[in-house]
Image (cartoon, coloured by chain):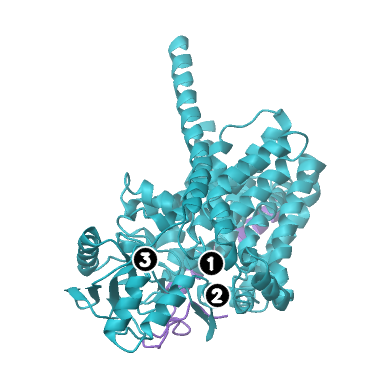
Amino acid sequence: MRQWRSWVLPAWSSVLALVLLGPALGRGYVLSFDMVWVPDLALRPDFLGVATGLPRAVPSDAVVALLDEVVPGMLLQKAVLLGSLVAGGLGAARLVPHTALVARAVAVGLFQWNPFVAERLVLGHWPVLVGYAVLPWCLVAAREWRQTRRFPRRLLCLVPLGSLSAGAGLVTALVVLAFVAGGARTLRALLLVVAANAPWLVAGLLHASSSVTDADGASAFALRDEGLLPGPLAALGLGGAWNAETMPSSRAGMLAVVALLVVLGLAAVGARTWWRRLGARDGVAFLVCAVTGWALAVLTWVAPGATGWLVEQVPGAGLLRDGARQLALLAPLLAVTAATGVDVLWSRGPSGLVGRLAVAVAVVLAPVALLPDAAWGVTSRLGSATYPPSYDEARDAVASAVAEQPGDVLVLPLSSYRQPAFNDDRKVLDPVGRYLTPDYVASDELVVSGVVIAGEDPRVREARAALDAGTPGERSELLGELGIGVVIVDVTAPGPAPLVAGEQVLATSDLVVVVLPDTAERDVPTGWMVAMAGAWSAFGGLLLAAVVVGLGSLRGARRRRRITI
Amino acid sequence: MGTILTTIGALVLGGVVAAATIVGVVSSQTAAPDKSPTNVNAPVIEYGSN
């Protein structure tokens, strides 16, 4: 009986993840908004944080580039998406260990099947989802650290995993600090989160002069009303992400209101019991995280002007402009209080087997019933795509060209997003540059509801100015001075692609590769290299320590088993 | 009597939620999209809309 029960939660979490991802698990790559995976992401200097633009994909890109040397990119992406969802759900169940099985299943469902997860999946924010998944595990480990005064070694792996992007790293750091804080541990916890976040932190400091962002972005990426729910209430239900195109349609109607009432109702029923069982110290930590996440999200809704001023004036403040992203901090509190509410009601529910079974079906299925269109890849918003053969041809052509004459690649047209036919016209960040092997320059300008949000990379501005030159020869010369050695044009993408002089080494139906005659070498300041080496050593050191500790534990367990036998 | 009513109530609740889940998931997958989210011929492809 006990054995059967131990499989219920992993099975339920897996079913939810499979139904949620649906077609995204088919053969091919999930290319959705900011999520661009390629068969073999090449590690290049820019991925280490020494690019001229802001380090938006540090350290996630470098980690993927290393891992896909071992596991093929396609498989790795599916494993990351599926693993994140399942791990997150099971982690949520660990937050309510002393409740009935049905209550833990509700925690799994609420944490795994909600607007935040659906919208971040479609937006392609996979490092945020990885951070979201490790959040409950970090929370449990951090609490254990404080209570037992012994450092849980799994944090060596969990905290770097939760810090694969700047936004995710801040959330992970706040959770760890909130639950650990007290005495000398606070400093050690601070060192841990700083080391885990060092790659993007140091890279961000190196780019401090260009790390302020366009004020228009604050309004564009602010928390949004969803259907009948104003922003603050949508946020309480973990919805309200800025992009209407990623919102499940059911969020526009009454179902969103019902979902909010059900979750808040259950949370209200369970709040007192939850507080009594947990104790004030941990309760306050939960509340601090939840209130911070909700308040940061609501700030972008209440005062987009002030947020705009902040992101334009304060380096690094742009991290806060995507308001709903911080709602990851609210999710654990909602899941545990609502699950405790179910536990309270369960203890007073019908006593017969049939009645209890019926109630269990109702409460466990409720998250799905209240957001049905999250199913099957958020109603097929997610799918799997196969790159055309021309991408491989372009990769080979560019690799040969830069082997003879080193230089970076300029991707044209200078616009950020594409809707490739091979991706069923789904929007995605231009995948061409990532498919190639050298560093590349591509547009970082974004257009939201017709408003152009300026990018921050000075090299893109310089390339744009070079393309404005009068003749192909002049353009080629000016681009060469910027360190550009190859220009690749996606002829299927809308937007201008001015001619440049050079040798055309590939021309397919969708991609054209031109090698420029002369290229200056782009220098990366030595100080930057040294600083980033230190940051990566801190980040990699944690993971290395986690591996060593893990292997040690494994060996110890084997030895103990042998002695027992 | 109370036990029987509670059981019937639980059965109704469980049945309604299970049916709503199946109907909701199936209808959301089979319904036509309410609007075309994108225009592949636009001069610039927008990141999104509010």
Which residue is pictured at 58% across the width and 63% down the height? A116
| Residue type (three-letter) at the residue carrying disc 3 | Tyr
Give residue A142's quadrant in the image.
Answer: top right
Check whether the beta carbons of the residues at disc 2 and disc 1 lie within 8 A of each other: yes
The chain displayed cyan equals: A
- A221 with respect to A419 (left or right): right
* Residue that carries the numbered disc 2 in the rendered image: A243
| Residue type (three-letter) at the residue carrying disc 1 | Glu
Residue A100 visible? The answer is no
Q: Secondary structure at mark 1?
A: helix
Which residue is pictured at 37% across the width and 60% down the height? A37
- Dot 2 or dot 1: first in sequence order is 1
- A135 with respect to A67 (left or right): right
Q: Please provide percent x and percent y for residue A439.
A: 36, 62
Q: Please provide percent x and percent y for residue A432.
A: 32, 68
Residue A550 visible? The answer is yes
The chain displayed purple equals: B
Q: Are marks 3 and 1 on the same chain?
A: yes
Is A17 or B41 nearer to us in this picture? B41
* Residue that carries the numbered disc 1 in the rendered image: A119
Q: Secondary structure at mark 2?
A: loop
